[in-house]
């Protein structure tokens, strides 16, 4: 692997990659890299910033190129894909934000399968899911992935792409909930009057377009997407995902029924973590190994009490919440991870009771109920941790669902300070 960012972040990125077990070679420039290491195509993955994008892709000759951007605009993403980059994202703030796309790129070339770590397991629902992925991946069929937040819908999409005939082309991921409504049509399909602004659909030509949170698409954009699918004008495989009840959205006329049936050629349902039984313990061990190595700390063990709690806890935030709980425990703990370090013992009854009282809630309804019920007692960080999402995701969902944080009174002067 060759890492060629142009600024001081190179050392941190290399540290994250090395802690994950990768051999990292760094250089100040493309010419320096070729002088030191030979052809860039010898690397498994090449990572650089947007200033190197076109030249990296031109010299990579089939090697996956991950472009990191300080701005991370959709227009720049399209431009990067047009020049031959296979992956594009904002500069990572955490190790996992870098490692997930790296594992995905390695899996696409067959060099590594560790990016599927959270998709493993021996529980019946996971065995069924993995079997279905193996059958549908080599086809050109459109796939609709359903599952709660944090279950790994993007990982399933990456697994499908990595095992497809399009694995050497780009996989472009779009979170439909993260793009403002008035911009999403132009970002997907481009500007008709601007030749230099191509849409993500065109950028994914020959590859795969993954539309996450497809239920958030406005109706007019749904209609245009249906036209593309019905007309087969694009050489793109479409994979969509949702945590919302699309059938319910159809009844309320918020989602087109004809588009629903176009998307649901093959349906894959990801089981929530609480339904994966003993898989949780193996998954927790895998996450603990990676997290300890990444943080440069000795790997502790789980106490028997903690193991019981891992299996019995409701996990409303699914795998993402499990990762957060284990990282917190590794940072704060020493020799053994206890239930108190995981911070799930006191959280479980509140969430379980809420779920039991409203069994028919969608995850979106659950989010609104949980936030409004607990925002006066919990900070934004605590709310995000309990939900198994980032503070940024919490803020974005607040804006989208119109539940802003209540303003609190300004605190008076501290009484312990004269």
Image (spheres, rainbow, N blue to C red):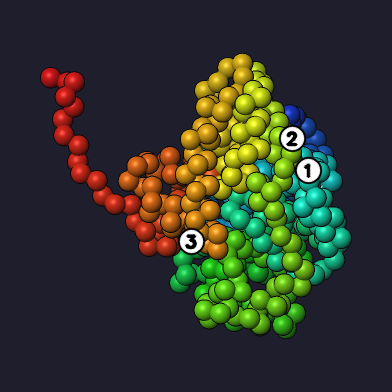
Pointer 2 residue:
282
Vertical placement of residue 165 versus 385, above or below: below
Which corner quadrant of the image does residue 94 belong to?
A: top right
Which corner quadrant of the image does residue 325 belong to?
A: top right
Mark 1 and mark 3: Cα distance apart in space? 29 Å
Pointer 3 residue:
365
Q: Are marks 3 and 2 in contact (CB under 8 Å)?
A: no
Is 131 left, or right, of 149 in this rendering?
right
Give the residue furthest to the left: 418
Query: Which numbered disc flags the more N-terminal residue, 3 or 2?
Result: 2
Front residue of 310 and 3 = 310
Q: Residue at x 53, y 35 (%)?
A: 344
Q: Secondary structure at mark 1?
A: loop
Residue 174: where, in percent of width, then height? 60, 61
Q: Are marks 1 and 2 in contact (CB under 8 Å)?
A: yes
Query: Which numbered disc flags the more N-terminal residue, 1 or 3?
Result: 1
Residue 377: where, in percent of width, then height? 34, 42
Q: Secondary structure at mark 3?
A: helix
Q: Residue at x 39, y 43 (%)?
A: 380
Front residue of 34 and 129 = 129
Q: Secondary structure at mark 2?
A: helix
């Amino acid at each position: 692997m060759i890492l060629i960012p142009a600024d001081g972040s190179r050392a941190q990125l290399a540290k994250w990659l090395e802690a994950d077990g990768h051999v990292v070679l760094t250089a100040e420039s493309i010419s320096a890299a070729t002088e030191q290491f030979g052809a860039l195509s010898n690397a498994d993955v090449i990572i650089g910033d947007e200033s190197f994008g076109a030249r990296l892709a031109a010299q990579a000759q089939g090697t996956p190129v991950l472009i990191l951007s300080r701005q991370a605009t959709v227009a720049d993403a399209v431009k990067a894909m047009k020049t031959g980059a296979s992956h594009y994202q904002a500069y990572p703030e955490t190790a996992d934000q870098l490692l997930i796309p790296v594992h995905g790129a390695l899996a696409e070339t067959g060099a590594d399968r560790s990016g599927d770590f959270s998709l493993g397991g021996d529980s019946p629902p996971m065995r069924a899911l993995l079997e279905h992925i193996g059958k549908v991946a080599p086809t050109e069929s459109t796939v609709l992935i359903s599952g709660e937040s944090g279950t790994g819908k993007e990982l399933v999409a990456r697994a499908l792409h990595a095992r497809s005939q399009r694995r050497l082309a780009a996989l472009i991921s779009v979170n439909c909930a993260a793009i403002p409504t008035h911009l999403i049509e132009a970002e997907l399909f481009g500007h008709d009057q601007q030749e230099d602004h191509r849409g993500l659909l065109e950028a994914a030509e020959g590859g795969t377009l993954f539309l996450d949170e497809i239920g958030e698409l406005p109706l007019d954009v749904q209609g245009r997407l249906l036209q593309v699918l019905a007309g087969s004008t694009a050489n793109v495989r479409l994979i969509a995902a949702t945590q919302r009840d699309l059938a319910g959205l159809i009844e309320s006329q918020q989602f087109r029924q004809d588009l629903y049936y176009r998307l649901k050629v093959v349906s894959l349902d990801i089981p929530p973590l609480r339904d994966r039984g003993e898989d949780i313990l193996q998954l927790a061990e895998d996450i603990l190994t990676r997290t300890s190595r990444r943080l440069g700390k000795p790997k502790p063990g789980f106490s028997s009490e903690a193991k019981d709690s891992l299996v019995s806890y409701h996990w409303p935030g699914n795998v993402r919440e499990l990762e957060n709980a284990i990282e917190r425990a590794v940072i704060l703990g020493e020799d053994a991870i206890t239930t108190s370090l995981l911070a799930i013992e006191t959280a479980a009854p509140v969430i379980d009771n809420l779920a039991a009282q409203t069994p028919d809630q969608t995850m979106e309804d659950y989010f609104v109920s949980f936030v409004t019920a607990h925002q006066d007692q919990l900070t934004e960080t605590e709310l995000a941790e309990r939900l198994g999402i980032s503070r940024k995701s919490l803020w974005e969902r607040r804006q989208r669902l119109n539940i802003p944080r209540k303003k609190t009174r300004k605190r008076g002067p501290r009484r312990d300070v004269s």
